[in-house]
Image: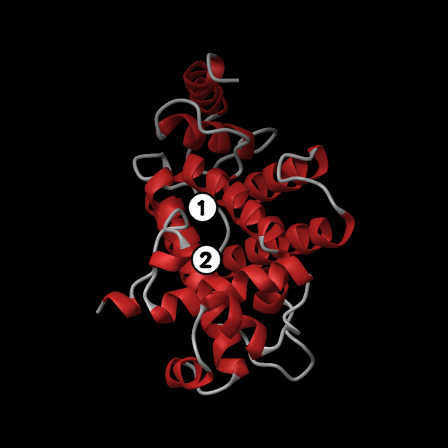
């Protein structure tokens, strides 16, 4: 049904079906007022609907807020998937971080509701969806042999870093490409993968990690000469990718 679909941002409000019109109107009012403490009457007025229509689609204001968050997040998610399709797992992870931060600072009220609910409030469904999307991205890294920490630890670390950075920017101002945010992103990715970039085919970062782990280390089963030869081969593989 058209009413249940997420409409693109560029569709004029008046052309949307009632449910989408209510969602979009509420989202606009939340961001304009910098709070979700907006009356349903204001939402009705901007959406051009009556109270019975609003409550037909949303049983109460809490339900409306949850649906607004979900609608905005699903539109962001569709855009993210389209833009990261075809990228290497590491490039997709890096781009996904940037888009996540941009989503948050572009919709500060909704993001704060999503990741920092009031005391006693339940976690937004969109936050759970975001976590599963992150888990899928990390699974792609793992399948490529690039994840060097346990998957659950990687999810927790990346989620904490990305949401913390975004909430910091919401409170203090700044952009997704601020130097300290990029430095944090890159540091987290290095912690997860052991590599600072994704240049070259998959064997290059793997060789770099192995070379680093062999520094000043004896390897059972290999003679000193064999170990030196192995280090030399790995150094050659990574030499042009430093």
* Residue under pointer 1: 147
Using a 10 Å C-alpha cutoff, classify the residue at mark 1 as few (fewer than 14 neighbours), some (14 to 19) or many (20 or more). many
Q: Residue at x 75, y 54 (%)?
A: 171
As drawn, 157 above or below 128? above
**Mark pair 2, 1: CA separation:** 8 Å
Residue 202 drawn at (x, y percent): 35, 30
The reply, left or right, for residue 74 in relation to residue 173 is left
What SS does tag 2 mark? helix
As drawn, 60 above or below 21? below
Q: Residue at x 36, y 34 (%)?
A: 88
Which one is nearer the viewer's eye here, 93 or 212?
A: 93
Q: Residue at x 53, y 45 (%)?
A: 97
The reply, left or right, for residue 160 in relation to residue 78 is right
Q: Quadrant of the N terminus?
A: bottom left
What SS does tag 1 mark? loop
**Could you tell me if residue 126 is visible in this image?**
no
* Residue under pointer 2: 151
């Amino acid at each position: 049904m058209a009413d249940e679909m997420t409409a693109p941002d560029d569709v004029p409000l008046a052309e949307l079906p009632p449910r989408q019109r209510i969602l979009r109107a509420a989202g606009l009012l939340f961001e304009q007022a910098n709070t979700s403490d907006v009356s349903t009457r204001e939402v009705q007025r901007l959406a051009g609907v009556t109270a019975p229509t609003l409550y037909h689609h949303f049983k109460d204001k809490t339900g409306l807020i949850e649906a607004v968050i979900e609608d905005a997040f699903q539109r962001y998610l569709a855009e993210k998937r389209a833009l990261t399709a075809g990228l290497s797992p590491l490039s997709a992870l890096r781009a996904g971080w940037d888009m996540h931060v941009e989503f948050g600072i572009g919709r500060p009220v909704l993001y704060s509701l999503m990741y920092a609910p009031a005391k006693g409030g339940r976690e937004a469904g969109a936050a759970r969806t975001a976590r599963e999307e992150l888990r899928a991205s990390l699974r792609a890294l793992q399948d490529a042999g690039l994840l060097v920490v346990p998957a659950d630890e990687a999810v927790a670390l990346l989620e904490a870093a990305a949401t913390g950075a975004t909430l910091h920017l919401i409170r203090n101002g700044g952009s997704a490409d601020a130097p300290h945010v990029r430095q944090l992103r890159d540091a987290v990715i290095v912690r997860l993968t052991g590599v600072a970039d994704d240049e070259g085919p998959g064997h290059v970062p793997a060789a770099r990690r192995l070379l680093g782990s062999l520094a000043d280390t004896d390897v059972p089963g290999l003679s000193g000469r064999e170990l030196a030869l192995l280090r030399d081969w790995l150094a050659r593989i990574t030499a042009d990718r430093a």
